Image (cartoon, rainbow, N blue to C red):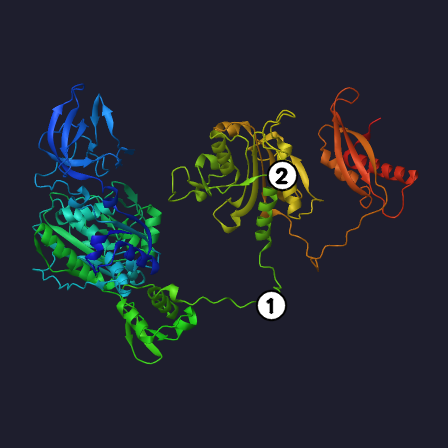
């Protein structure tokens, strides 16, 4: 919500400074997001007279001007504007001035051999317009030496506040002034608004075509005809205010409705009466109807859309946007002014479905003041008559203003109970009354009636909030929370929350840097990772390349790694823990931990070193990260299976899938597919892993969290090597699993240390050598016992994998 300081002072009589107003707005919950003060930016620019403008001796298109900036000391300026001439008044910028239109700071310079001390400026160079054709040509009565911003009326700061959704009353400048007046910073101006006395009935009938169930879609519709108007540009003061808040002036009739939308929070619509056929009917749209709206787009309507139609068809989408066919232009002489009430929920649904964002929708879906619907029509009528002339008719009113008021039984002690602040009863009463609340009764409990413009106030807590925010949260005495001596029985964090935190610590400890990427990615990237479904496309993306919810964390990390590489940091190791989305249902959302390594960013270190050549990352580096993460999370890996291959975005021969059985896939690791890198325009060697934390087995419940006693054997461990010949397609993991199962109590470690294919090995087979560590716990093993265990290992591996011991 934007407004200018002078516009605010139309409603608030105050001498407070801009800083005081800004601080007060934030203090009462209307947070100031920014203040645009053009006068400060344009302070060095002054009105100057061109004493002379002579041809440049060394350039045909340049002139050497002598400029009087008002101090009686002329300065020489080289100017290339075709309209620079002797005697004209323009805007001068001295050396040291920042020029926003060119993004430069002026200095004393030499142009084609002639010294130039400043600049004569165009509107584009000051950032005020798109006019590059020449320097500003000011009227003859412009005072030389006066700051240009002051003379041009640009010394009116624009304040932007951030409104919470419940404060629809402050979507108007009058409502903001009301809140400020309640703090004592000024007095609210209350101008009388007598009703307009029209001549004769409005010739356009209005019909609300709803059944009893749908009456709330449009409880009130008021219409008035004004004949004989002359439509043209709106006054300069109105155009200046509309431009200041980012609106483009169109014509007087349209500008009046836009002005009142911000000034009073009352959206209205104007129809060219001669373009309306017959009467107006407010109804549900019929499936298949369409409307070419004022933005030039065609919208397909359905039965959930409330429209305003005439005898020819739909003329406007109620409460959101009017139609192009009945819009007002310079030929309009008779105008119908509409002021209506609409159902907030229906407006919100319709706006989202059609993708239309307007100032009218913004206010109607939050709730406008129902009691101001008819006074707003009168106010708009008076402005039309004042600015465009014409004679008004009486208003046609269909429906009635709904009765939404409710009385709240309010004990004054509720403020102390809920907010912990002691305020006098008189101060609290004055605060509520200044905000428009009606109070009846005396004593400890009173009856409070909220004003019609505050639909968000429903109970006692809301009244406490109103009192406290005006009084100031700084008046609440800080007190420490009581110390709780007992130990919490239940854990404060869920298993998933603990795993998310542990995952971040574990990956950071492996030398990876945490990244936080957008949950939205380009549609093309989403499709590469199995996403891109219509139900995961954003209806209103913040940018064209952030259109889809991400199906994986990998694409965001890939883009981040490439951005670092483009800036001279090719060896990056990144990780992220965040949400991914497989569908728009709650069960389609999952928490994942993902790591990515690029270039030489191995766990052992990155970059070149004198001791040896730098090695690029490979799939085993990603595998090590994934297994280290599972170990840090305390996930038992006894039943973990590592299966070759993975999703399409991984290299089919350099990737693996982590699973606890075929139906419980918990993650993937490996090298990124070259086809994917080409599609995303990425370079370099990249490996990644992704673990779905939701899919990991839950920890086993234990009666105590104390760790078991550490059992260390004093006996010497021994190691035995076995070389098995197996078919080439048998995974080494199957050999390890089978060998481990031969003697679980005694075998404390097993690993692959050699893989051989070639001479001496049958065609289609391979030799896998493993080292088995045996740890006795009671006595030293004899040769016979060692041989017995070895035989069991050979037998078990042979049984499970078909392996034979290599001779």
Is 454 situated left or right of 625 in this image?
left
In the depicted view, which residue is nearer to us: 781 or 543? 781
Can you give x and y, in whole percent of width and height, for residue 235 in the image? 13, 47
- At horizontal 9% and vertical 49% (from top left) the residue drawn is 229
- At horizontal 28% and vertical 34% (from top left) the residue drawn is 105
Can you give x and y, in whole percent of width and height, for residue 276 in the image? 16, 49
Residue ranking furthest to the front: 73
> Which mark is nearer the camera, 1 or 2?
1
Is 182 situated left or right of 603 in this image?
left
In the depicted view, which residue is nearer to us: 519 or 602? 602
Can you give x and y, in whole percent of width and height, for residue 13 in the image? 20, 61
Give the spatial CA distance, label 1 vs label 2.
Answer: 41 Å
Can residue 343 be seen at all in this image of the molecule? no
Up-down relation of residue 600 to residue 482 (above or below):
above
The residue labelled by disc 2 is: 625
Up-down relation of residue 448 to residue 116 (above or below):
below
- Quadrant of image for the C terminus: top right
In the depicted view, which residue is nearer to us: 119 or 6? 119
Name the secondary structure under disc 1: loop
Q: Say the numbered circle drawn on residue 32.
A: none
Can residue 557 be seen at all in this image of the molecule? yes
Q: Say the numbered circle drawn on residue 485.
A: 1
- At horizontal 79% and vertical 31% (from top left) the residue drawn is 803
């Amino acid at each position: 919500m934007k407004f200018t300081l002078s516009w605010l002072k139309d409603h608030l009589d105050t001498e407070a400074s801009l800083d005081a107003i800004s601080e007060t707005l934030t203090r009462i919950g209307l947070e100031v997001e920014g203040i645009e003060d053009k006068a400060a930016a344009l302070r060095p620019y002054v009105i100057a007279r061109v004493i002379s403008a002579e041809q440049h001796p060394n350039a045909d298109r340049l002139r050497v001007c002598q400029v009087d900036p008002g101090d009686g000391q002329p300065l020489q300026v080289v100017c290339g504007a075709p309209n620079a001439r002797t005697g004209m008044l323009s805007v001068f910028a001295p050396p040291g001035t920042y020029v926003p239109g060119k993004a430069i700071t002026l200095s004393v310079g030499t142009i084609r051999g002639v010294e130039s001390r400043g600049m004569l400026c165009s509107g584009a160079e000051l950032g005020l317009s798109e006019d590059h054709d020449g320097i500003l040509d000011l009227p003859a009565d412009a005072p030389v030496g006066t700051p240009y911003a002051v003379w041009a009326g640009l010394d009116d700061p624009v304040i932007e506040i951030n409104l919470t959704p419940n404060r629809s009353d402050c979507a108007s400048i009058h409502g903001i002034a009301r809140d400020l007046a309640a703090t004592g910073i000024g007095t609210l101006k209350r101008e009388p608004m007598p009703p307009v006395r029209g001549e004769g009935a409005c010739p356009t009938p209005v019909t609300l075509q709803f059944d009893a169930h749908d009456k709330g879609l449009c409880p009130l519709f008021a219409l008035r005809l004004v004949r004989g108007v002359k439509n043209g540009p709106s006054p300069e003061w109105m155009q200046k205010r509309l431009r200041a808040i980012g609106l483009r002036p169109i014509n007087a009739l349209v500008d009046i409705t836009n002005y009142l939308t911000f000034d009073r929070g009352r959206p209205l619509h104007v129809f060219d009466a001669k373009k309306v056929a017959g009467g107006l009917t407010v109804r549900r749209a019929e499936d298949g109807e369409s409307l070419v709206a004022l933005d030039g787009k065609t919208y397909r309507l359905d039965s959930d859309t409330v429209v305003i139609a005439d005898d020819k068809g739909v003329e406007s989408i109620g409460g959101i946007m009017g139609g192009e066919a009945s819009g007002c232009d310079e030929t309009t002489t008779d105008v119908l002014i509409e002021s209506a009430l609409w159902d907030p929920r229906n407006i919100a649904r319709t706006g989202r479905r059609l993708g239309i964002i307007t100032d009218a929708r913004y206010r109607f879906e939050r709730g406008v003041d129902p009691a101001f619907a008819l006074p707003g029509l009168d106010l708009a009528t008076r402005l039309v008559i004042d600015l465009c002339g014409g004679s008004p008719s009486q208003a046609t009113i269909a429906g009635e203003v709904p009765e939404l008021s409710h009385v709240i039984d309010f004990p004054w002690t509720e403020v102390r109970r809920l907010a912990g602040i002691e305020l006098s009863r008189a101060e609290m009463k004055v605060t509520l009354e200044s905000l428009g609340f009606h109070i009846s009764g005396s004593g400890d409990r009173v009856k409070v009636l909220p004003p019609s413009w505050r639909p968000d106030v429903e109970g006692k807590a809301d009244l406490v909030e109103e009192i406290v925010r005006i009084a100031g949260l700084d008046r609440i005495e800080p007190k420490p929370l009581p110390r709780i001596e007992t130990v919490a029985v239940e854990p404060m964090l869920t298993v998933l929350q603990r795993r998310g935190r542990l995952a971040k610590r574990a990956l950071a400890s492996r030398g990876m840097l945490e990244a936080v990427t957008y949950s939205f990615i380009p549609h093309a990237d989403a499709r590469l990772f199995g996403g891109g479904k219509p139900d995961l496309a954003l209806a209103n993306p913040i940018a064209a390349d952030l259109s889809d919810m991400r199906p994986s964390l990998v694409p965001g990390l890939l883009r981040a790694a490439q951005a670092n590489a483009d800036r001279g940091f090719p060896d990056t190791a990144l990780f992220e823990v965040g949400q991914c989305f497989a569908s728009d249902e709650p069960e389609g959302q999952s928490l994942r931990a993902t790591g990515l390594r690029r270039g030489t960013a191995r766990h052992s270190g990155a970059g070149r070193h004198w001791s040896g050549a730098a090695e690029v990352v490979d799939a085993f580096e990603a595998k090590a990260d994934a297994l280290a993460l599972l170990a840090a999370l305390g996930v038992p890996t006894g039943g973990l299976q590592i299966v070759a291959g993975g999703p399409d975005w991984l290299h089919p021969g350099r990737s693996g899938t982590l699973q606890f059985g075929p139906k419980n896939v918990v993650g993937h690791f490996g090298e990124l597919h070259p086809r994917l890198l080409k599609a995303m325009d990425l370079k370099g060697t990249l490996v990644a892993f992704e673990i779905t934390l939701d899919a990991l087995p839950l920890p086993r419940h234990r009666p105590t969290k104390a760790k078991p006693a550490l059992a260390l054997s004093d006996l010497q461990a021994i190691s035995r090597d076995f070389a098995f010949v197996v078919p080439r397609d048998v995974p080494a993991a199957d050999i390890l699993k089978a060998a481990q199962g031969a003697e679980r109590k005694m075998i404390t470690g097993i690993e692959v240390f050699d893989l051989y294919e070639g001479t001496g090995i049958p065609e289609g087979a391979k030799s896998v050598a493993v080292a088995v560590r045996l740890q006795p716990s009671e006595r030293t093993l004899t040769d016979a016992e060692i041989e017995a265990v070895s035989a069991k290992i050979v037998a078990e591996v042979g049984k499970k994998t078909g392996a034979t011991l290599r001779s």
